[in-house]
Image (spheres, helix red, strand yellow):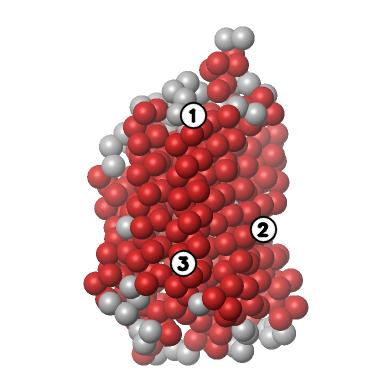
Amino acid sequence: MGNTLPYWRLSGLYLWYFAALGAFLPYWPLYLQGAGYDARQIGVLMALLAGTRIVAPNCWGWLADHTGRDLSLIRLACFFTLIGFAPVLFVADFRSLAVVTAVFGFFWNAFLPTLEALNLTWLEGNSERYSRIRLWGSVGFIGAVVVVGELLDRHLKIGQLPWIMALLFGLMWLTSLTVPKGAKPAHDTRHAPLRAIVKCPEVLGLLAVGLLVQMAHGPYYTFYSVHLANHGFDRSQIGELWALGVLAEILLFLLLPATRNGLFLRTLLLGSIALSAMRWLLVAWGARWVWVLVGAQLLHAASFGAFHVASIALVHRYFRGRTQHRGQALYSSLSYGAGGALGSLVSGFAWGDFGAGWVYSGAAAVALAAWLVAWIWIDRHDAPQHRSSMR
């Protein structure tokens, strides 16, 4: 990795960020359900959290591009995530929880695109090694899913989950303080203006695909644990199934070769979206059979892992120089933000009326729409700023 790259400290920041996510995504809907909130309220709260990704990454990306203080902004966001989450330990009513969710969600979702851009900048010329750092986020996620599931089943009550989250947010902030300030490569000045890049068909296609794919994931992140609990799975089993999906993702990150060839990125993207649609159909109609759920979770390597690697590589290829952070932020806000919020909100309102089978079938249909957009538009081999710079 070289002498200047703080590999373990960067990996540690990914680890604790995704460990918090691993404690949150599988068990927070169960916590909300145990606190007396209905499906629509749970959907609104999860959509609100996802919705902060629409605004927060763009704010942090703009600040990072204009100040160059990537690391300071990352540390600031980690600190205010912890401070913003603290009131969850005391509030009880829906409106107060919604406000607190918006506050801590804003800071929690603010810095990951900045971290991604900073990481890829340090790895310039060796971007295939990105997955070797990012996999520690998956390790953190899987560890938290398994450990927290066991704790909640055998030692703790679901109402104590906020204390676990506060601990993980504290570790995330402390780890951010250990990442050293290092000399960064000079900005690449050969880039088109942000507006010109965004107008390129392949970029618009990528942004649309990201939104649709993450919208299709909305029912998974919001109601997968509830879906399993309704079929008789206990919290340890729910955690094990979540962990299996992330384990498959880790293996993919370890085995996936360098992805610099544009055609390979296109193939990887299309394949991952197609398998994503298959996954949601398996979850929709096969929850009574453990072996079907196991197969569906193994497809997480494609629906999230392969898609993430391909899309992040394409974003880094399209947005260069002083558009790097804003490019990553724009992609994150539209996909994980708008897409995730729409998926959570729609599934929350549809869950009670149509049931899990049709909600996840709808997710499969959205994934197929994303595949069609990718097939039509993401088929160009030259990064848009390269063409712009030759005009």
> What x and y, as percent, mark residue 229?
42, 83
Which callout, 1 or 3, points to the residue nearer the camera?
3
- Secondary structure of the residue carrying tag 2 is helix
Q: CA distance from mark 2 to mark 1?
A: 26 Å
Query: Which residue matches tag 1?
Result: 317
Q: CA distance from mark 1 to mark 3?
A: 33 Å
The answer to which of 14 and 260 lies nearer the viewer is 260
- Name which of mark 2 and mark 3 comes first in the sequence: 2
- Name which of mark 1 and mark 3 comes first in the sequence: 1
What residue is drawn where x is 54% and y is 31%? 202
Query: Which residue matches tag 3?
Result: 360
Q: Amino acid at mark 3?
A: Tyr
Say the numbered circle drawn on residue 151.
Answer: none
Query: Which residue matches tag 2?
Result: 52
The answer to which of 210 and 192 lies nearer the viewer is 210
The residue carrying pointer 1 sits among few (fewer than 14), some (14 to 19) or many (20 or more) residues within 10 Å by Cα, namely some
Q: CA distance from mark 2 to mark 3?
A: 24 Å
